[in-house]
């Protein structure tokens, strides 16, 4: 393997203006062609050569010959960094590594990057003005194994047939086991898709699957006598899955000005894209969808798009997100927990969640707010970082300009939120359908717009505003949000975390009864839910907790009988610890 690194020349490249000259390079001239071996190393070598040939102020556009490019881990460059909301695997065999570039366009011309084993298909780090166009990402043998239920008996269990692409065996312990290059998995959970309509089967949520004592039948199917579930009719497709998420399809780190267009992600063992500590990102026609030609009903192992500790503007538009094992979009910051008060100006702060640490959290000059974990009351005082020093992948020593409030100490349970690294966001003209968990999650205090989208059988809540300094440690409060002209079709067919209504404003507050302030909002009409259409078989439409300034008007409801109502919340609108609510009658 070869290591991808930052060259001194790259660090000294001049900042490019908007009208900088662009030179085009054909990667086939550098030995990068469909079917070639060591493609990752060839691409890395070509990019370094091209960068050396650029003149002052020149951009580069590299073009791939259309085709399928197969990447294997043992012949790929290594990219070493922590990726938020993943398994914190530090060493990543990487197909395309864009490191320390200022002005690069990669046009794949509709090519497919077909990865094997466990890999990071695309890494973009410490760069500016990057464009990725016309690319498809897939894996040869996905770690999710899809099977079709062929028979279901209350007495004899379930028989199933694996999808043709699944490599499988009955292992020595009598369990169904799938395998691929460098990995093997047994499963005890999965997601059930309706074979005809492709949505997740109502009231199934995360299946518990007992794969003990499996046998191969005479016709090549698998009999699992201990797997019993009356809701799984013959023809149901089940995506057998683990909870591993080593890497997304795209990992973006410390990058400013990223434009991704006409890109399709069929599968990754993590998310479709994760961007952390980055700014000004636009995704246009960034599609995370099942590879229907392969017979799949699933796409990524986790979220389609995920933005952590970003700033500037995030725009996701004209995209389709289908069949993911988690949310379509999640935008949030990260609360660091106060672990020690060193003096009146200095705190020891720590990442708390096991899948979120190792990256930069703040810089000198950043503005920081503090929240009490038990009640999610935000202190009125904000402060400014004067110095920040990392002491481990999970810990920082942070010094502040002003004396810290006396209340802040480890014993009381406080979190710190970096308000500087928060983005404005636009999510529009997108389709979210047939996925597990939730649709869109927004947690930024800056202007956020969610408009003109179709949320079609999102399984859980379609739109969630959370905020959690107790479990996920994903900040923060929403101060300016518009949810308008969206169509919600049969959301909430299953129950996952935070699924109290189709739109759920649900900060995680252990002691709501002791809360003094309100977590979300803060001004009249801070959160506006207007002119949406709810097509639903059940009752709950909007739930809000700890919100000050909620306006609900102009929305329409169309009731249907597509599924059996089952939700425990029998209120169309339900508010807990809220004020300044203007709500229409439904």
Image (cartoon, rainbow, N blue to C red):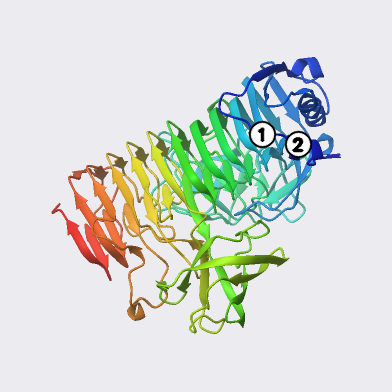
Verify CB contact (< 8 Å) between mark 1 and mark 2: yes
Mark 1 burial class by Cα count in 10 Å: few <14, some 14-19, many 20+ = many
Image side of residue 560 versus residue 317, left or right: left
The circle on residue 312 is none
Furthest residue toward right: 1
Foreground of the two, 276 or 216: 276
| Rendering quarter of residue 140 | top right
Residue at the spot 64% in from the left edge and 20% down from the top edge: 22
Please name whichever residue, 304 or 129, is drawn nearer the observer in this view of the structure: 129
Residue corresponding to mark 2: 10
Separation of disc 1 and disc 2 at Cα?
Answer: 8 Å
Using the image, determine if residue 114 lies above or below residue 310. above
- Looking at the image, which residue is at 33% across and 73% down? 517
Q: Position of residue 504 (x, y in %)?
A: 34, 57
Q: Quadrant of residue 21?
A: top right
- Percent x, y of residue 269: 64, 44
What residue is rendered at 35% in x and 57% in y? 479
Quarter holding the N terminus? top right
Identify the residue under disc 1: 102
The residue sitting at the left extreme is 585
42 up-or-down from 566: above or below: above
| Residue at left offset 79%, top offset 44% | 182
């Amino acid at each position: 393997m070869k290591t991808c690194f930052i060259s001194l020349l790259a660090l000294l490249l001049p900042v490019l203006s908007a009208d900088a000259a662009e030179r085009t390079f054909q990667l086939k001239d550098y030995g990068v062609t469909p079917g070639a071996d060591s493609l990752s190393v060839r691409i890395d070598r070509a990019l370094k050569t091209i960068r050396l040939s650029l003149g002052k102020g020149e951009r580069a556009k590299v073009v791939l010959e259309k085709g399928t490019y197969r990447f294997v881990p043992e012949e790929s460059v290594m990219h070493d960094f922590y990726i938020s909301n993943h398994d914190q695997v530090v060493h990543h065999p990487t197909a395309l590594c864009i490191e320390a570039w200022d002005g690069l366009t990669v046009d794949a011309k509709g090519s497919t990057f077909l990865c094997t084993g466990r890999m990071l298909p695309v890494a973009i780090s410490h760069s500016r003005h990057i464009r990725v166009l016309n690319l498809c990402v897939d894996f040869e043998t996905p770690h999710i194994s899809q099977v079709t239920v062929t028979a279901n008996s209350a007495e004899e269990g379930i028989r199933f047939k694996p999808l043709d692409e699944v490599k499988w065996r009955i292992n020595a312990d009598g369990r169904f086991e799938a395998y691929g290059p460098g990995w093997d998995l047994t499963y005890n959970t999965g997601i059930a898709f309706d074979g005809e309509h492709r949505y997740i089967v109502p009231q199934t949520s995360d299946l518990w699957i007992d794969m003990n004592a499996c046998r191969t039948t005479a016709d090549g199917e698998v009999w699992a006598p201990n797997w019993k579930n009356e809701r799984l009719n013959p023809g149901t497709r089940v995506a057998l899955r683990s909870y591993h998420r080593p890497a997304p399809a795209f990992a973006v780190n410390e990058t400013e000005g990223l434009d991704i267009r006409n890109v399709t992600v069929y599968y990754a063992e993590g998310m479709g894209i994760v961007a952390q500590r980055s700014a000004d990102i636009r995704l246009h026609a960034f599609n995370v969808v099942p590879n229907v030609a392969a017979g799949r009903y699933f796409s990524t192992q986790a979220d389609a798009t995920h933005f952590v500790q970003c700033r500037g503007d995030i725009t996701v538009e004209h995209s389709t997100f289908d069949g993911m094992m988690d949310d379509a979009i999640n935008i949030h910051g990260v609360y660091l927990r106060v672990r020690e008060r060193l003096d009146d100006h200095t705190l020891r702060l720590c990442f708390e969640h096991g899948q979120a640490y190792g990256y930069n959290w703040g810089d000198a000059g950043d503005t920081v707010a503090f929240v009490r974990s038990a009640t999610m009351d935000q202190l009125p005082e904000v402060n400014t970082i004067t110095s920040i020093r990392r002491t481990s992948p999970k810990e920082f020593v942070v010094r502040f300009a002003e004396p810290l409030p006396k209340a802040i100490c480890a014993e009381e349970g406080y979190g710190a939120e970096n308000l500087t690294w928060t983005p404005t966001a636009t999510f529009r003209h997108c389709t979210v359908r047939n996925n597990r968990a939730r649709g869109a999650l927004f947690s930024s205090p800056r202007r956020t717009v969610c408009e003109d989208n179709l949320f079609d059988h999102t399984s859980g809540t379609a739109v969630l505003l959370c905020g959690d300094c107790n479990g996920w440690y994903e900040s923060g409060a929403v101060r300016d949000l518009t949810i308008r002209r969206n169509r919600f079709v049969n959301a909430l067919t299953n129950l996952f975390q935070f699924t109290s209504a189709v739109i759920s404003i649900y900060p995680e507050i252990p002691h709501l009864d002791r809360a003094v302030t309100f977590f979300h909002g803060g001004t009249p009409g801070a959160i506006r839910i207007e002119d949406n259409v709810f097509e639903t078989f059940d009752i709950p439409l909007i739930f809000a907790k700890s919100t000050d300034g909620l306006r609900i008007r102009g929305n329409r409801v169309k009731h249907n009988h597509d599924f059996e109502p089952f939700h425990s919340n029998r209120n169309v609108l339900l508010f807990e610890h809220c004020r300044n609510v203007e709500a229409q009658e439904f």
